[in-house]
Image (spheres, rainbow, N blue to C red):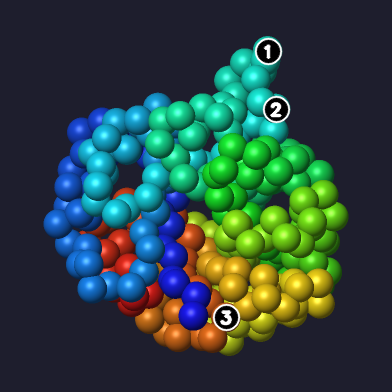
Amino acid sequence: MRKPLVAGNWKMHGSRSENAALVRSLMDQLRPEWRAEVLVCPPFPYLWETGRQLNDSGIGLGGQSLCAEPQGAFTGEVSAAMLRDVGCSHVIVGHSERRQLFGETDEAVARKFVAAQAQDLVPVLCLGETLEEREGDRTFEVVGRQLEAVVSVSGIKAFAAAVIAYEPVWAIGTGRNATPEQAQEVHARIRASLRALDGTIADSVRILYGGSVKAANARELFAMPDLDGGLVGGASLKADEFAQICAAAG
């Protein structure tokens, strides 16, 4: 049985005081009987302080991206070892905003995936299509290509220590979201692609949905058999709503 995971991607939001209040409120509301694993991914400057506040709460700490290189003259970049050093257990890899706004290619994402695992970080690999690609009936082609780019470099066994997040680009920050049935269709296709290579890993890997997940739609989305939780954006900045999403998953 796959344990649900709800990950909050804070993106470029927050301040020391806002983050402290958010974490306090979240810790007060989460219940140990809820089955879902919970992860928060603050901006880089706040990782250490947020991690110290989380302490032994059971809430995990993740980075929002990383550099594929282990160290060196890469101004402005952050390595996997640095993320591990400040307490991260996970890191988001290949988020659509990194692909679209910062030009990360499938090949670059694959290298970051490998770099994360080299430092025992669990990569949360994001896959997803644009509205144009969906309307052109290319969803499975695009998602399959993005997945294959990583599998071809890392090998299928690497997914025993990874998480996948399907995030339709057209549903991120737009207020739109895939229907539970649309999300399930893509999740099932991703799992089938993995099953063709290794059935055990396909059955065990967690596939999250990320695309305007809210308290209002979380329970219906998470009821789908191949949805194992969510990668949550804006709603993760509101402790009450994020807690409700965690409850729906758990």
The relative height of residue 201 versus residue 8 in the rendered view (above or below) is: below
For the point 67% across and 76% down, which residue is it? Answer: 200
Q: Secondary structure at mark 2?
A: loop
Q: CA distance from mark 1 to mark 2?
A: 10 Å
Give the residue furthest to the top.
Answer: 73
For label 1, the SS is loop
Name the residue beneath numbered marker 2: 69
Label 2 crowd bin: few (<14), some (14–19), many (20+), radius 10 Å: some
Marks 2 and 3: CB-CB under 8 Å?
Answer: no
175 or 129: which is nearer to us? Answer: 129
Q: Amino acid at mark 1?
A: Ala
Give the residue pinned by disc 1. Answer: 73
User: SS for tag 3?
Assistant: loop
Q: Looking at the rendering, which quadrant does residue 18 occupy?
A: top left
Q: Which residue is mark 3?
A: 226
- The reply to whether residue 244 is visible in this rendering is yes
